[in-house]
Amino acid sequence: FMSMPPTFGVAHDSTGEHAFPPLPGLADSALDEEVAEAAAEAVAEAEAQEAAREMRLATPRATLSIGSAEAHLRRRLELEPENWDLRRQLGEALLDTGDRDGGLYELELAMVGFELLGDIERAQEVVDEILRVFPASVGHHQKRVEYAVRTRDRARLANSYLELADALFRSGAGDKAVAVYSRVLELDRANDRAESALAALAPEALVRLMEKPATERPS
């Protein structure tokens, strides 16, 4: 057998000249544990970030705040100032926040933009939307009459005139309202609402209109 060193098995003070050196691999094992802990923490953090990202992606757009939607639309409009669909959406978002003046301004821009493009149907949609919020706006009622004339939609024209006459009456312009109610009956002889309004406001005008031969009433 190989002979043992003379000092084998003899205890020595750790500070002595012949103290045993550290066991091989001990310091490396401690370092490995630290590295493993750091790696586990990094993995946990990455998993948490991924879960948060998936939660954001799963959040419905409807949960976005109105303010963030408005800011998003404004940023897009900086790049596409003549995108009238975006302009309309911005107007709607402003109305939702209670900014009636700002919403009306953006909707009017969209309405005129669609009109200049020749898209009268879309312009009509926007003016209808404006009137749902501002039903007393005579100017927008007149704009709706104009669009109905341009699209040659007789039924829409009669209804637009009728709404205009109502708005004129509510604003105190009774004489103008009578003229417009008369125009409604010229377009739609069976319109009971216009006939009732004329009977109450100007019965003599109603009588004259009824006495006219059908051939004299404008088409």
Image (cartoon, grey):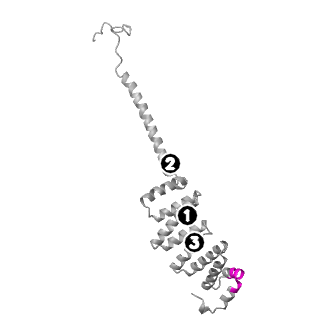
Q: Residues within 10 Å of mark 2 (few under 14, many from 20)?
A: few
Q: Position of residue 88 (x, y in %)?
A: 51, 64
Q: Position of residue 38 (x, y in %)?
A: 42, 32
Q: Are marks 3 and 2 in contact (CB under 8 Å)?
A: no
Q: Residue at x 48, y 51 (%)?
A: 57
Residue type at mark 1 is Leu
**Residue beneath disc 3:** 139
Query: Whole-Å distance between the Cαs marked 1 and 2?
Result: 36 Å
The residue range painted magenta reads 195-204
Res. 14 image quadrant: top left
Of residues 181 and 153, the one drawn nearer to the viewer in this rendering = 181
**Residue beneath disc 1:** 104
Rendered position, 17 above or below 149: above
Q: Position of residue 210 (x, y in %)?
A: 67, 89
Q: Residue furthest left?
A: 2
Residue type at mark 3 is Gly
Q: Position of residue 148 (x, y in %)?
A: 54, 77
In-image side of 34 versus 204 (left or right): left
**Residue beneath disc 2:** 55
Query: Between disc 3 and disc 1, whose residue precedes?
Result: 1
Query: Between disc 1 and disc 2, whose residue precedes?
Result: 2
Residue type at mark 2 is Met
Query: Between disc 3 and disc 2, whose residue precedes?
Result: 2
